[in-house]
Image: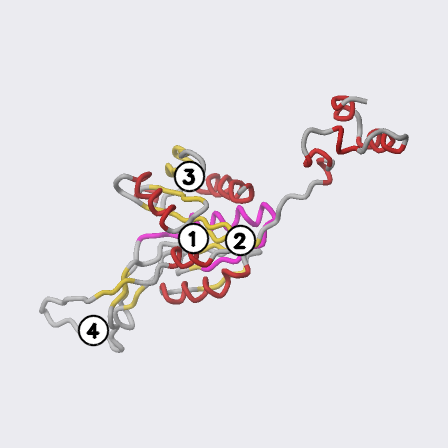
């Protein structure tokens, strides 16, 4: 019986062939994955940790620094991962969105809270997707009481926040996959690739400011070993589903 004969016949026939003294079934196939019937192959199910939304850095009890992130991409990724059968933990900054049913949700308002939640959950995940827009700066010292309007100029002293993605890149294990996002208004691909290399990412997703709060946008994707891919004017739901498929294949 030749290779094509086994491929065309049912697996029952292949097992009968082996029973009657023919070589082991694996010798009939060109690669190891073909020895497992398609209906018996299990899709890889992952524990995926996703961050979403824009963090807030409070100046006083009522005012804060933030950004225009809607959280739509992060929530779309969580829904897509759940639909694919993965286990999802969603660390979310404040948004106007309803968390996906089935996801374990951890609220995080500030960048420090998001860092602490990520640091706790990261060792237990197979993949971290950092879709959140984490503030780059926070007040060097927040006021404990509401700042009064005086009519005089106000100077804010800011300091950098912790770089959660860089921390994850330094601490990830061999089995873990790390996905980052880059929002750039100039040299999108060049800047995103630099970020991917500097932070040891397995996949970078880059887009322009026009993507903020939009339902559709153009996105660019790259892994360290493959050329850039560009998806034009794609919905965030569709893009999320494709990103999750790429993650599962890494």
Residue underneath mark 2: 48
Residue in front for this viewpoint, 152 or 243:
243
Image quarter where the N terminus lies is top right
Secondary structure beneath dot 3 equals: strand
Residue 154 as seen in the image, left or right of residue 13? left
| Mark earlier in primary sequence (2, 1) | 2
Residue 97 horizontal/vertical position (percent): 44, 55
Q: CA distance from mark 4 to mark 2?
A: 41 Å
From this view, report whether residue 84 is shown above or below residue 19. below
Residue underneath mark 3: 222
Residue underneath mark 1: 130
Q: Is residue 90 magenta?
A: yes
| Mark earlier in primary sequence (3, 1) | 1
- Callouts 4 and 2 close, C-beta under 8 Å: no
Q: Residue at x 80, y 29 (%)?
A: 10
Secondary structure beneath dot 2 equals: strand
- Callouts 2 and 1 close, C-beta under 8 Å: no
Residue underneath mark 4: 147
């Amino acid at each position: 019986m030749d290779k094509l004969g086994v491929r065309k016949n049912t697996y029952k026939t292949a097992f009968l062939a082996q029973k009657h003294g023919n070589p082991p079934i694996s010798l009939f196939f060109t690669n190891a994955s073909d020895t497992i019937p398609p209906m018996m192959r299990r899709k890889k199910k992952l524990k995926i940790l996703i961050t979403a939304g824009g963090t807030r850095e409070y100046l006083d009890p009522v005012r804060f620094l933030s950004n225009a992130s809607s959280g739509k991409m992060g929530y779309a990724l969580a829904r897509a991962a759940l639909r694919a059968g993965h286990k999802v933990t969603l660390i979310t900054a404040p948004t106007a969105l309803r968390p996906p049913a089935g996801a374990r949700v951890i609220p995080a308002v500030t960048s420090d809270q998001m860092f602490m939640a990520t640091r706790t959950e990261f060792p237990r995940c197979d993949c971290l997707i950092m879709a959140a827009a984490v503030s780059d700066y926070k007040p060097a010292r927040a006021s404990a009481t509401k700042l009064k309007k005086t009519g005089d100029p106000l100077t804010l002293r800011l300091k950098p926040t912790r770089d959660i993605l860089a921390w994850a890149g330094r601490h990830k294990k061999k089995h873990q996959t790390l996905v980052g996002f880059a929002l750039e208004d100039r040299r999108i691909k060049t800047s995103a690739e630099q970020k991917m290399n500097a932070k040891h990412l397995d996949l970078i997703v880059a887009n322009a400011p026009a993507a903020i709060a939009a339902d559709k946008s153009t996105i660019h994707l790259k892994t360290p070993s493959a050329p850039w891919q560009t998806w034009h004017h794609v919905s965030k739901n569709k893009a999320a589903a494709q990103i999750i498929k790429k993650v599962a294949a890494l």
